Amino acid sequence: MSRKTWRHAPIVKGVPHLLHGGDYNPDQWIPWKDAVWKEDMRLARLAGVNTLSVGIFAWAALEPEEGRYEFGWLDEVMDLMAENDITAVLATPTGARPGWMSHRYPEVLRVNGDRTRNRHGGRHNHCLTSPVYREKTTAINTALAERYRTHPALGVWHLSNEYGGECHCDLCQERFRAFLQDKYGSLDALNQAWWSAFWAKTYSDWSHIESPSPNGRGEQDIHGLHLDWMRFTTEQFVDFYRHEAAPLEAITPEVPRTTNLMGTYPGIDYYRLAQVLDVVSWDSYPQWSGTGSDVRTGAEASFHHDLTRSLKGKPFMLMESSPSATNWRPVAKLHRPGVHMLQSTQAVAHGADTVQYFQFRKGRGGSEKFHGAIVDHEGSENTRVFRDVAAVGERLAGLDAVVGTATPADVALVYDWHTRWALDDMKGLLQGQTAYARTVIDHYQAFWEQGVPVDVLDGSLIAEPGGLDEYKVLVAPMAYMLRPGVAEAVNAFVERGGTFVATYASGYVDENDRTFLGGFPGPLRATLGVWAEEIDALYPDDRNAISWDGREYEAFELCELIHAEGAEVLGTYGEDFYAGRPAVTVNRRGDGKAYFIAARTGADFLDDFYRKVVAETGVERALDADLPAGVTAQVRSDGVRDHVFVLNFNPTAAAVDLDGEALELGPHGTAILERPRKGGNES
């Protein structure tokens, strides 16, 4: 996470350029290859494409019969890419196995939570524990690595595709029990951690433990069990990734490995999975309106980019995005003029060293035949979308100076998968609608609209020694679960001069989802200087008010009733039986401050509140200018030179006043400015 590394090496050794391209499926065109493949290379050059991802779902084409490999077609494609200076992101095909495997070895098929086994079909429909599936995975991955180890096109290994889902088969149940035995050591310790005396669920034998199932309501209501099942599922993917990567690492140790993530997908703790990736990649599909303001969509997409970058604290790969319509959305809206350039530039601004798409050429059949692509069914460069992609390719080709550069941030925002799992399970508050992810993005957006760069951390990163040393501000919305070391790290951060912001529903449970005793917010009570006695969940039409800094703001959904215990009261509730009680506080502790916001509010309060925080802490803004509504800015730097990206998420033109000169931005317009870095050592 350190900013001391101002520039990282390019993702692909010897390729000091931003990568531009996308998923390529030549295996779908083998019967027509003479008419299609060479034409694809011509079109790729015209579009400024210098990378293509190949083989992602090609297992049936690579191994049509068990043990019989057909690499000739892939040899030809890889050679064509090398001849055209196109880097291959070569995939292992394990996201969708061939039919012969499912029918010959039914154990590879997943079992659902209701204990029914799936039939062959779809993708990611495999058991991660299955010895057969692991054996076949090792075999195909080894064969690929050995065949292409020295191929000049090989640049990155793309393992599987969008890991996700669960398997509840007997093999996975046994593995789950082993995971628990290793973690707890004894049933007594497990029963205490899970509070299993509730509803007589005390376990007397390891064999009685099963994964959560809709057929066993008691199992679902033991929150510690479900929490550990989610952690186990994450470890399953970590272990399977390591298994997949082993032959690739042994045979091609210099080739980086990744798997593509999905933003805030709830099924896997991505901070944990990222630990075993060489480079992080993700698939971004914002739902742009194109005709109205896209401020919220832009903030959400930027948050996911910053989250992805923060997983390893270095540039990431935008593995998939759509250059036009996204077919799986309920409304497959076309990108309006300028939107494709905007979303691509936005990704680079927030730390992407690649802009890649699904897909390069539209297929003729299947559920994704109408998904956006560089090359349409019409088959030529004479389309609007192709011209949009080519314009992005031209811009990226001029940004070699950005490759590997850092995205410095003085603000850290907490997004924690374990907290989300616990809040999703919680019986109380808003019954499954506590909106953790939405709330975190609400707070993020208040910084984003000011052009303040933000890193996104979780409890594991905060608790690391020195994990907060480089930040001036730490924001932890709804820090419901506090894992070991987090509260201590936060308190030390405040005492040495940092500014901490927490909200309602913080400090309720420990890492096992057991409530803290002695009053909420648990181990943060002294740091924040408040005691949260109760929390009021409001009906959808209910509203309260907060009076703060001479204004009144709306409060809704959740209002916590707190007592100031050393904290200064800055704002109070305006209505109901808790009118006049504290709603906004600050506690001065050591050299720093700890703020507490007791209620859920609208964007107006968060905007005003965080503008004051930014002003008083002096955090870095990408531009020292007042940004019009819907315009934001982000910076990348090598420590000497800054590249400032200015982005307009409005369908109308906007202008930014830069020391008396107007920077004009068209509808969905973008600009990239260069400047010496303050304090840099430019010669």
Image (spheres, rainbow, N blue to C red):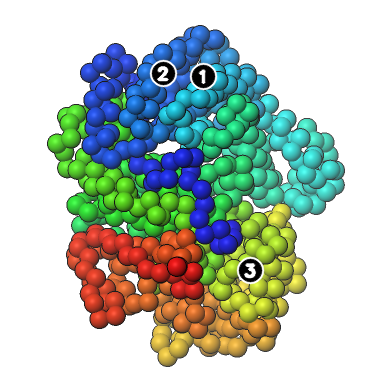
According to the image, label 3 marks what residue? Answer: 469
With respect to residue 39, does 473 lie above or below?
Answer: below
- At 21% from the left and 68% from the top, the residue drawn is 664
Q: Residue furthest front?
A: 683
- At 31% from the left and 61% from the top, the residue drawn is 672
- At 30% from the left and 67% from the top, the residue drawn is 630
Query: Residue 374, percent across and down?
Result: 26, 37
Query: In the visual, does 544 lie left or right of 37?
Result: right
Q: Are marks 3 and 1 in contact (CB under 8 Å)?
A: no
Question: What is the crowding at mark 3: few (fewer than 14 residues within 10 Å), some, or many (at least 20)?
Answer: some
Secondary structure of the residue carrying numbered label 3:
loop
Separation of disc 2 and disc 3 at Cα?
A: 49 Å
With respect to residue 518, does 571 lie above or below?
Answer: below
Label at residue 457: none
**Residue 95 seen in the figure:** no
The mark that comes first in sequence, 2 or 3, is: 2
Label at residue 75: 2
Label at residue 147: 1
Secondary structure of the residue carrying numbered label 2:
helix
Query: In the visual, does 167 lie left or right of 17?
Result: right
Which one is nearer the viewer's eye here, 520 or 39? Answer: 39
Query: Residue 645, percent across and down?
Result: 34, 62
Q: Indicate the amino acid at tag 2.
A: Asp
Query: Residue 615, percent across and down?
Result: 46, 82
Q: Indicate the amino acid at tag 3.
A: Asp
Q: Nearer the viewer, mark 2 or mark 3?
A: 2
Query: In the visual, does 303 lie left or right of 431?
Result: left
The mark that comes first in sequence, 3 or 1, is: 1
